Amino acid sequence: MVLTVLNTSQSALSNEDIGSRLEEKMDRVTLYRILQSFCDDGKLHKFFGDNGKTYYARCQDCTTDHHSDNHPHFRCLECNTVTCIEKPLAVQPLPTGYQPTSVASLITGYCPACKKQR
Ligand SMILES: [Zn+2]
Ligand SMILES: [Zn+2]
Ligand SMILES: [Zn+2]
């Protein structure tokens, strides 16, 4: 049910967005637990927006024990849509001794639809 909401959405959704799209109302804690378990299963990945919200999006090739969502996310300042940019994020070479396990990057700006109207 929760997954259906994200499957039908082209963009990433915050937990509030998901909650408001569910047919049956669910309390925040229950929803959070469900979303978290999908993250553990490799079905969803979560990331934090610059607006303090937590977003969830579908994973492409993730498995239970390995997430490979090292792509940037784009938030449109006009329509607030958050999209996964399915391009690998270039990781800067790190100083010796640092081992990165995940890379996150959030880009803000205007999406193609909003850019046209400007
Ligand atoms: Zn993932
Ligand atoms: Zn937009
Ligand atoms: Zn993503």
Image: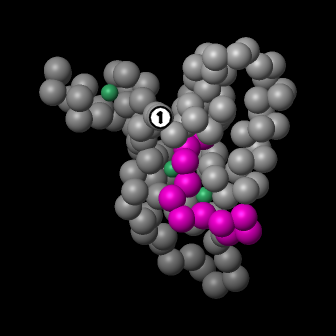
Q: Is residue 99 above or below residue 30?
A: below
| Image position, residue 25 (x, y; %) | 73, 15
* Picture quadrant of residue 18: top right
| Image position, residue 10 (x, y; %) | 41, 38
Say which residue appears at 67% left-offset and 77% top-offset.
Answer: 99
The reply to whether residue 104 is in sight is no
Which quadrant does the C terminus fall into?
top left
Q: Which residues are magenta?
A: 56-66
As drawn, is 12 to the left or to the right of 83? right
Amino acid type of the residue that numbered disc 1 sits on in the rendered structure: Thr
Between 114 and 97, the residue placed more toward the observer is: 114
Q: Secondary structure at mark 1?
A: loop
Where is mark 1, residue-wise?
8
Between 12 and 90, the residue placed more toward the observer is: 12
Say which residue appears at 23% left-offset and 29% top-offset.
Answer: 113
Q: Is residue 38 above or below residue 3?
A: below
| Image position, residue 6 (x, y; %) | 55, 36
The reply to whether residue 110 is in sight is yes
